[in-house]
Each structure stands twice: as structure tokens, then as C-alpha cells.
Amino acid sequence: MTDGMALLGPALGLSAILFSLGVAGVLLRRNVIVLFVCIELMLNAVNLTFVALAQLHGASGQVMVFFVMTVAAAEAAVGLAIILAIFRHKQSVDLQNINLLRG
Amino acid sequence: MTEFLDSIGYGQWILHALVLLPLLGVVPVLLGPESSAKWTALTVTTLELVLSAGLWWALDPSRGTLQLVSTTPWIPTWGISYRVGLDGISLVMVLLTTLMLPISVLGSWRSITKQERGFYAMMLTLLTGLVGVFLALDLFVFYIFFEVMLIPMYFIIGVWGGTNRLYAAIKFFIYTMAGSLLMLVAIVALVWRIQVVTGLTSFSYDHVLQHAGAAGPLAPWLFAAFALAFAIKVPIFPFHTWLPDAHVEAPTAGSVLLAAVMLKIGTYGFLRFAVPFFPQVALSPAVSRIVVVLAVIGIIYGALVAMVQPDIKKLVAYSSVSHLGFVMLGIWAGTLQSVQGSLMVMISHGFSTGALFLLIGMIYERRHTRLIADYGGIARVVPLFSLIFTVVALSSIGLPGLNGFVGEFLVLLGSFAAFPLATVLATTGVIFAAAYLLWALQRMIYNRLDNPENERLTDLNGRELAIMAPLLAGIVWLGLYPAPVLRRMEPAAQRYIQLTRPSHEAAPVAVTGSAARVRP
Amino acid sequence: MTEAVFYVFAACAVATASMCVLSRSAMSAVLWLTATMLSLAALYVLLGAEFVAAIQVLVYAGAVMVLFLFVVMLLNLGHPTTDMRGPAAMAATVVIAGLLAIQLFALWSYSPDRLAAEIAQAPEFSDPASLFAAGQATRDDAVARGVVGAVAAPLFEVYLVPFEITSILLLTAIVGAVVLAKRKI
Amino acid sequence: MIASQWVWLAVAFPLAGFLVNGALALRRAPATTAVSIVGPGVLLAAFAVSLGIFFGLLRDPPHQPHMVPLWSWMPVGSLDVTLAFQVDQLSTVMLLVVTGVGSLIHLFSVGYMREDPGYARYFAYLNLFVVFMLVLVLGSNLPTLFIGWEGVGLCSYLLIGFWFSEKANADAGKKAFIMNRIGDFGVLAAMFLLWRELGTLEFADIAARAPAGLAPGGAIVTLITLFLFLGCTGKSAQIPLYTWLPDAMAGPTPVSALIHAATMVTAGVYLVARTNVLFAMAPLSSALVAGVGAVTALFAATIALRQYDIKKVLAYSTVSQLGYMFLGVGSAAFAGGIFHLVTHAFFKALLFLGAGSVIHAMHHAYHATHSHEDAQDMRNMGGLRQHMPVTFWLMTIATLAIAGIPPFSGFFSKDEILASAFARGAEMPVYYVFYAFGLAAALLTAFYMARLIAMTFLGDNRSGAEERRHLYEAPWIMTGPLLVLGILSVIGGVINLPVFAGGHHALEGWLEPVTAAGAAFARVELPHGSTELALVGGAVLVGAVGLLLGYRATLTRKTPPAREAPADTGLALVLNRKYYVDEIYDAAVVRPLVWLSRVVLWKGVDQGLIDGAAVNGSARVSRGFGWLGSRLQTGQVGVYVVFFLVGALWILRAMIR
């Protein structure tokens, strides 16, 4: 048992708080960019979980964090490009004005 | 002939060849140029016909059991094997199929002008499905072929059909699919029940047939699922409304195959699967009563509705409902005469309705209308067409001496002992049949020629005569000398009766005491 | 000592994340998030993942967040009044996020001992010691080969194929982003 | 003399003729000469075969029919329907009548139809008809008979609608076929019952097994015979299925002579005689047969009184005479019925051909002057005796024969039927009523026939001055057959001369082996002595009075030509419109059926209920669900997130304890 292992529970709890904050942001905000920011926050919460559990399970947890970061980077790039395209079209980043998925 | 077939090992490879050949034929059709697609398709289907002809001799007519059975393991863990074989009933159905295919390819010769490769590829795939359905002796394989033939037909109607083709194609597809999915559930449930009892998982027809009693209390439900799938296919009133739409919208070849072969898969399914698996349910008084009443309703209802159709294709479609009612009546009556009669109706309906659709297709190519009212008096300009149309219509009416009569007569004669009242009512169908077809005949080819567009009609050409010739020959041959066909089918029909009513003697039932007194 | 440092950075992370969610302008939200990431990087160090912490600072807080800032500035949204949703959404947020927090916060009580006990009860896993052994092996590895080597070994051995796929994903994302963002190609 | 085994030749000749003529008909170029030779030639050959067989039988009358199996038709288990002919006394009589009278009518047709564009087609049909008619009378079992039975119906259909470009003709053909089909339904049902009860469909076996296998007078045998008789009413135009026969006159006149007078329509009588054992065992059915026959005889005769179309008169006369035949066979006088069948074939064929000759002349006259008057309307005729003396005299002979004036053939046969009905009255008094009906019908028959002759041949000519110059006697190819039929009409009675006329009921004796089975159950003892003479005298008197009345009633009044004739009123109108039976059938059966099919079944059940409600209904329900689902897709990401999170919470709740 190292020091870090005692922090497993608190780390997981912190990750829960951060994740819930991210969810709250997604629900609360209408600005698409802020939405993205909140999603990044949620991803970071998950990363924290991975790192915390890596103490038990081995380096796989840390490797996962790399993958998450890569995907997050890709997502940010594409997502922001989409926001740019939408903004050009609608002159707005407000979610209420964006309902292309309407059935 | 038998020696020759033995010498080339015919029995070992023929069934696989019949299933695979059309599928292989798809490749050159798709890869070749657009213009040669129909030639390739014609070659392949004709080859298939020639190959299948040998089955007539390869089958031992003295035995009613399944012959030329060949089994190849496929998915052993689920007890699924590719298992094919045939008896007298499958034999005639396969021959009917392989005969109809080259004819329908020839019938599409001029009428299919767009995406010919796709069309003929579909036709060949359909042939594989149809032949496979009649040969399959494994429930899983049967189900697969059952679906395989559905998809090409969907495209044939949906792509090369008439104006309202999408509605018809989707209706056809969903109707059939609804039934066949239930059937799949029933197949799996039945196999599962049998596995519970015998400890052996097997979709093999023989195994399932032998242990179908294991279904126990599930039997009525399983039978209902099988029956619904086949009833839609037949179609039995009130599951028939896909048929007129599909027929009207389908191109000629589609209508021909639909009527001549695909409808028979429903009745074949009853004969091969549904009734032999669950005879106690199927032939119980309650179910019998329902089926027979529906069959008689189908006969009369189909005829009456056919009578008032303004569209000649719809008329023939409804007449199919009527004819297939006879088949159902005969299957349920369960005497040798009625079962044989049902089989004869299946065959002769293939010939006469197939021929009717071909003829309608030929005249449609010239006038581009199917409305009866648009014709009239054309016997004067197209005498050959009129002659053949009349003969075929008469065969459909059931004129003795032509093929339609033999089956109907045997069905009714055989069914009378079992269901006297229903049979008498069904017999009135012959009156209505005369009414609707003769009325249509009169309005189309007799009367005064008062539409100037009809003046320019040209009579049948050589290709069209070549299409009709084998059908006409069959119509007359089956009408006057059906004995060889009847003898081929008799052992299989006997076996069906033994399977379904082990207690009864298969010989014609003399119910009353008076007849028994007369018999020596 | 370690625990005290942990709670300090944890408090920082929660505070900055809250500011990020609540701050009015997009610009400040991005900046607050960057602060959260830096706090998390510190926590990673405490949890024994030094290399991840470095990457977090360099790539995440550095590169990705700069991308966000670029876009925010590019759009030049000015100072919007607010983009908060109405009271109904607020209530829904409180309910949903609250429930989620309560559910997830159950994880707080997870200690290695409890985990070991639960795993031992579950019939599928035989030996909890084998799980913890993997963690111990990593730490030993880090001592032997350095923090980078401990992560690199599994990354290029076990996860080689996913790693390569990730590179293709990145390439696709680049192309996609260019196609989407350009007016005309 | 020809052995019975060669009887198939009699069928094969016309069949070959049909094939040759059919092939010629499909060619564009007419082949009049070839058709003229082949058409009647094959019939004459068949007649020669028939004669040979007849003489063979005459020399050595068999007690069992000679069976000539052709091939096994429907072998299914114990049912083994063989296509087989049987040659016995009854079938030989029919064979002779069909081929003999048929030959004459074929010859007549050469003259009558020569100029028709469908000449080859006509002979093809006619030959085919003979094929089927021979199959009908020769068939040794019911299914074989049924081939012929339906086959003649088909040919009748084709020949009635021969000039199919007229809707009325095509209508008439269709009506004939469908009405016959109603009757065929009866024959089929009877077959099913027979098969169930006796296990056979062979006539010989039926005759052998029925006495033991069926209860005499029982419900089963009554039902069988009723079904059979339903078939007979269709084929032989008895009430209630008679209305097709008058319409059938739309066909060429020789066709009316052959099919609708001499041969096909008598098939019903033949069938009753063939299955005489069944009818003899079912007195109730026999009474019904006799009753329907008697009523039809009288009913049709009344209609014939007020018809103006010469062929329509003869058509109703045929219906009426067929009624007589059924009165005969219904009175167990099977031989008597067949006797009348034979003599009727002679004189009615003669009448029709004579009428054909008249129509031919009138048609040519009107054609020459481009007039569109009706060549068949008797009001346009009159005084034709001067122009067509041969036809006139021959038709007069036929008239005397049908009116029952001795010594013409009709006298003997009609008298025998009436006497039989009278004799049956001793057992069942209702037969006295039938007898009275028959006698009344005889009076009316004489009346309308005299009217026909008087309107057509006597008095002033009303066809018009111009047309009169174009009226000629028919050529020899037409008058020749008439002459032969005339001779037969005179001497035809000789085949069954009664005792009082110095004979010994030769035909009855000849048919004895066939009718013996029935005779075991029902036998008529014809009255003897004074009763017999009184009956005979009464019948002759009635006939003579009828003739006289008809003659006087027609000639004393001036008949205006058709175009100037005042409309009929009152009873005459009712009779002229045939009691409105066609209209009643149309309103009571045809229209309701079509309405039911179209409005209720097709539009209502099929399109409305099944397709509309059930099929498209389920489609609409699923589309409804789909619409509901699509309403959830607001396009607002926040809403999706809420859904997503609620689901995630739900799953978490299950996972985290």
C-alpha cells in the first residue's frame, strides 16, 4: 500500500463531483462552446478515475487516459469546426437556435 | 433412362446442382454485357429445366418416402445441416418451377428494358429460392430458402413493376414477412421442445416429424404460427389482399411466378410441414371447421369478387384465391382423392394461371392497358391470341378434358365424404368461375370492336407462340392423360395421409353402411 | 501530508470547475477549465501518474484549451447577457445533477480493502491479490524504467493496434476539421 | 358390319375434321372447298361407322354393353376413372341420331354458311360439337359423359356466339354456358354422392349396385336423382333453367337445328334414360321430372303462341317438346322418351332447317335491296309457298308430325308418352294432372305450328314488292337434307309402332337390356283396348282441332308487316315478353349478385374491411407510433441530454449498490 492508494476513495469522490458539475453545466448552459467546455470537464473527471484506479490495475488505466485525451482532442477539433460552420450559417452559438435534428 | 441416369451418378449431385446452378448463373449475368443478360438467363434456366427433367425417372415411383436425400453438416452445434431430398410431391413442384422459369424469362424478353442484368439476376436467385424451398428437408434451410425467394420477388415487383409498385411490393413483403417470422419462432420453439424431450438439437425434417409430439401444450400455438405463414402465402381468405396488388403491379414474369409457383409454397407447406407436424391440432374438428369454412369462403368470395374486377390482372388474381381454396379443402379432407386432387389443382393452376398472366402480358405490351373495358371485339384482329386465351380460360374454368377439371373434380369427389355441405357449396364455385371468366372473355375478345386503337393490334409472334406452346400442351395433356402424374404423386399422397391419420385407411373412405355392403 | 495536499488541490479543482460552469462568458469558462486541469495535473502526481500529469499540462491544458480560446476569440461573441437556461431547466439540472452526484459519490467510500472484499465475494473473480499485484508491478516498473517507460511498455505492446487506430482517428479529425471550417476548398 | 371395338373411329373422324378445319380457320386465306369436303365428309364417315356398329349389334344383340376402354384417365386409389366408351342399344340409337341427323345438317350448312367469312371456323366448331356429343352418348361412366356434357355446352357457347361482334350474340352464348354450368353443378354433386354411396361411377356398376346399395325411395337416391335432374334442366332447357335456349337462336340456324333441337338439348333425356335405375328407384324424383316436364311443355307452348321470330317459335316449341320427353321418362317410359327424342330429332331438325331455308331466302332478298328489315320476323313473310314450294311442303309434313297427326312420326311417340303418363296416374293420381297438361300442350303446339305455317307460307306476301322478286327456293345442297328429314319425319314412327298399328314396340324391345334395371322398380303397363283407343282418339282430336284453330285464327285476321304492327297489349304482351322471366331473373339473381360482389364484397369487405381497416389500419397504427416517436425528437440537444441522463441514472441505480 502506497500513499496514493489511500486516496482512492477521495479521488473517486472528487471525480464524481467534477463529473456532476460537468453534467450540470451541460444542462444549464446554452452556449455551445461552454457546452464543449463542460464536456471536457466530464472527460477530465473520467480521466481522474482512470488514474486513480491505475494504482490497482496497472498501467492500463494510464494508457486509457492517453486515448481519452486523443479522442478529446479530435472531438474538440471537429466539434469546434462544426461550431464555426454553424455560426457562419446562423450567426449564433445558442443551442436554442440549432435544432437540425428535429424529427 | 434410369440406367443412363445411374451411370452418370445423377442422383448424387442433381439436387445440389439444381440449387446452385441458378446462383452460379447470376455471376455471368451480372458480369456480362446488358444485352446478353437475357440470353444467359435463358440458357441457365433451360439447362436447369433439362437437368431437372431427369428427376422424373430418378424418383422411385413405388415409394412414398423422401428420396435422393443428401445431408451436409452446416452448423453442427445447432443441429443444422444442409439437407435436401424429394418425394413425388416435391418432384412435380420442382418440375413446375423449372418449367415456368424459362417461360417467364422468355415472357420478359421485350417487356423488361431497364436494368436487365439486375432483373435476370433476380430471376435466377428466385429460381434458387423456389427450388430450394421444395427440396429443403431441414427446417432452418427451408426457412432460409423461404426468405431467399422473398427478396428477389420484392425487387422484381418494386423495381420493374407498374405505377403503384412500391405499395404493392412493400405490402407483399410485410405480409409474407409477418407470417414467416412467426414461423421462424415456431420452428425454433419446436426444435427446442424436441431438444428438451429427446436431448438432441436438430432441425432435420425427419427428426422433427418423428418427435413433433414433444410440442405438447404448445402445439396449437406452433401450428397457428406455421399455419399463418402458409395461409398468407396461399393465400387463404382473409389474408389475400396482398395478392391482387402484387399481381397487378408485378411485371409479367413476376405475376407468372407468383401465381404459378409461389402460391403453391403455402399449400406445399401445409402438406409437408404444418399438418404432418401437428395432425391432432390441424385436423381437430374445430380447426378443420375453420379451415374448411375459410376455404369455401375463399372459393366463392374469390370468384364473386373476380367477377366485378375492371382490371383483368386483378380478376385473375382473385381467381387464384378461388382456386387455392379448392386446394385447402382437399388437403383438409384428407382422402387420397382429395389430396391428389389438391396436388393436381396446384399443378394445373400453375399452368393455366401462368398462361393467363403471360397472355395478359403479351396484350399489355401492345396496348398498355389492363382494363377490360379498353378492349372488346379483338378476336377479329388477333384470332390466334383469342383462341389461346379462350382455351386457357376454359382450362381455368375447369372444362373437363382440360387440366383444370381433373384437380377440382378429384378434390370435390374426395372431400364430399368428409365435408358434404362444404363440398356442395364449393362446387358452386364452378358456376361462378364460368361467370367471371366468360364475362371477361366476352368483354375483351368478343363484342363489337369499337375502340379504334384495338384495330392495329398485331397477333402473337413466333416467340410468344413458343412460350404458349408448352403450356398449352401441358393443359391438354394434364386434362386428358394425367395418370402418369397422378401415379408419381400417389405414394407421397398416401404417406401424407398415413402421417396425418394413422388410424384411417388411406383408401377412399366409404362412410356409409350402404357402400360397405356393396363392396365385395 | 500527502492527503492534505490532495484535499487542497481537490478543493481548487471543485472551485475552478464550479466557476467554469457558472461563469458568464465563454472566455472565462475556458480559462477556469484550464485552471481545473492544472489542479488535476497536481492530483495525478499525487496518485503516482507523473507522466500523465505532464501530458495533462502540456497537451490538455496547453494545446486543446488554446484551441478553445482561438475559437472563442474568432467568433468574437462580445458580452452576452447570460446563456443560462430558465428556472425549469435550473430545477431539472439540480434534480438530475444532484441525483447523479449522490449516486456517484457512493464511490467515495471505495477503499482498496473494501474493493478486495467485494471482489473476493464475486464468484467470477478468483483472487483480488492478482488485481492489486498489477498495480504494484507498475510501480515497480516505474522505479526500474522510469515513469515514461512504465506507460510506454503497455502502450506499444498490448495497445499497439488501438494506438495506431487513434492516429488514424486524429488524421481523420484533422481532415474533417479543415473541411468543415473552410468556406471553400 | 363393324365390331364395336372400332367405335372410337366414329369419334376420331369428326375430331380429325375439327383439327383440319381449325387449322384452316387460322389461315388468312379461306379454303371453302376443302372445308366443304372435310366438314360433312367426316360426319358421313362417322355415320357409316355408326351404321356398321348398329348392324353388328342388330345381328347379335348383347345383354351386357360392349366396353371400349381408351386409357386410364384419373387413377387414384380405388377410384379408377377410365376414358371408356360403351356400345349398347341405347348408345347406338343416340349414335345413329347424332351422326345421321348431324350429317344432314352438316350438308345443309354447306349451302347455308358458304358465304360466311368464318366458314372454316364454323365447321371446326360443328365437328368439335359432334365429337363431344358422341363422347357424351358413348361414355361408359359419368366423368367421361361429363367431358361430352360440358364439351357440347362449350361448342354451343361458341356457336351461339359465332357472330360474336354483336353483343347480343355473345351475351346469349355466355348465358347458355353459365346456365348449363348451374346444371353441371347438379351432375357433379350427383357424382360425388354416387361415389360415396356406391363407390363407382361406371353406368354398368351403378345399375348393378344401386338396387342393393341404395334404399328404394330413400332420401339418398332421391337426392342423387334430383341433382342429376338439375343437370338435365340446364342442358335440356327445362324450368327453371330454360331461358338460355330461346336466346341461343342467335347462332346460325343449322346450329339451332343440330344442337338446340336434335342432339345436345336431348342429352338430359338421355342421361335420365341412362341412369333409369336410379330414377325408377326414386318415385318422388320421377314425379318431379314428369311434373317439370309437363309444366314446361305447357308453359313454353303458351309463350310460343305470341312469338313473331320464326326461330323463337321453334325454340319454345323445342323447350315444350323436351318437356314431353321428360314427362315420358318421368313416367318410367324410358323407351318412350327416347322414342320421342328420335322422332323429335327428325321433325324439329326439319323445321329448323326449313326455317333456315326461309331465313336464307329472306335474308338474300333483303340483302339484294339493302333493306334492314328483320329476316326472321314472320310478320314480314307470308305467301312464301309460291316461292319456296319444297320447303313449304316439307315443313307442313313436320308440322303434322309435331302436332301428332297420324301416321306421321310424332303421333306415335307423343301418344306413347301421354299414354304412359295416364297409366302412371293409376299409381300416383298427380300424373293425371300431368297428362292433362300434356294434352293441353298438344293443343297449343298444334295451334302455334299452324300459325307458323300460315304466317310464313300462306296468305299475302308482306316482304315488299321489290324484295318479292328476289325470293327463291334454296339450292339442292339445302333442300336435299330437308327431303331426307321429311321422309324420316313421315316414317320415323315405324321404329316403335304400337300394337294397334300392327307393330310390336320394336324400340322398346331393343332398349330392353338397358331399361331392365329400372323396370325392376317401375314399369308402365300401357293401357289396352278401349282406353287406349280413347286416349289415341283424344290426342288426335286435340291435335287436329289445334291445327284448325291456329290456321283460322291466323288467316282470318290481317297481319301487318313488322314495321307497321301495333304494339302488343295485355296477355299477348306478357306472352310475347315470355312472362318477363328473363327480367325477373335479372332483377332477382343477376343484379343482386353483381351488386353483392361489387359493393359488399369487393369495395366493402376486401377494400374496406380487410385492406382498409386491417392491413392499412395496422400500417396507420405503426405510423402513429412513429409520429409519436418523432415528436420526441425536438432537435434541442438539451432535451436529448435529459433523456440520456435519466437513462444513465436508471442504469447506475441498478449497478451501484
Image: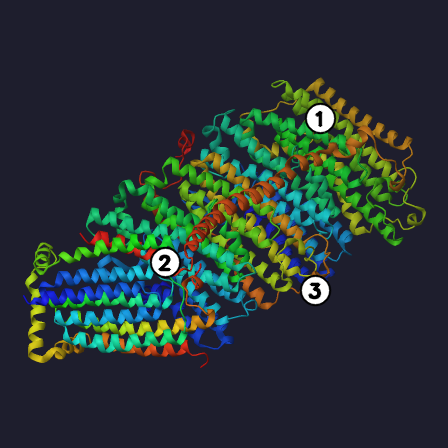
Residue B467, relative to residue D459: is it above or below? Answer: below
Where does the image place residue D539, in percent across and percent down from the top left? Answer: 75, 24
Q: Residues within 10 Å of mark 2 (few under 14, many from 20)?
A: some
Tell me the CA gap for discs 3 and 2: 66 Å
Q: Residues within 10 Å of mark 1 (few under 14, many from 20)?
A: many
Write down the chain letter for disc 2.
Answer: D
Name which residue type carries label 3.
Arg
Relative horizontal placement of residue B214, taking residue B173 as reference (left or right)? left
Where does the image place residue D249, in percent across and percent down from the top left? Answer: 73, 43
Residue that carries the numbered disc 3 in the rendered image: B456
Q: In what element is the residue under mark 3?
A: helix
- Camera-side residue: B291 or D354? B291
Residue that carries the numbered disc 2 in the rendered image: D640
- Camera-side residue: B185 or B8? B185
Between label 1 and label 2, give the one nearer the viewer: 2
Write down the chain letter for disc 1.
Answer: D
Residues behind callouts 1 and 3 on a single chain:
no
Tell me the CA gap for discs 1 and 2: 95 Å
Relative horizontal placement of residue D183, taking residue B329 as reference (left or right)? right
Where does the image place residue C78, in percent across and percent down from the top left? Answer: 41, 71
Residue that carries the numbered disc 1 in the rendered image: D438
- Camera-side residue: C52 or D305? C52
Residue at 33% across, 63% down: B11
Name which residue type carries label 1.
Gly
Q: In what element is the residue under mark 2?
A: helix
Quadrant containing the N terminus of chain C in the rendered view: bottom left
Name which residue type carries label 2.
Tyr
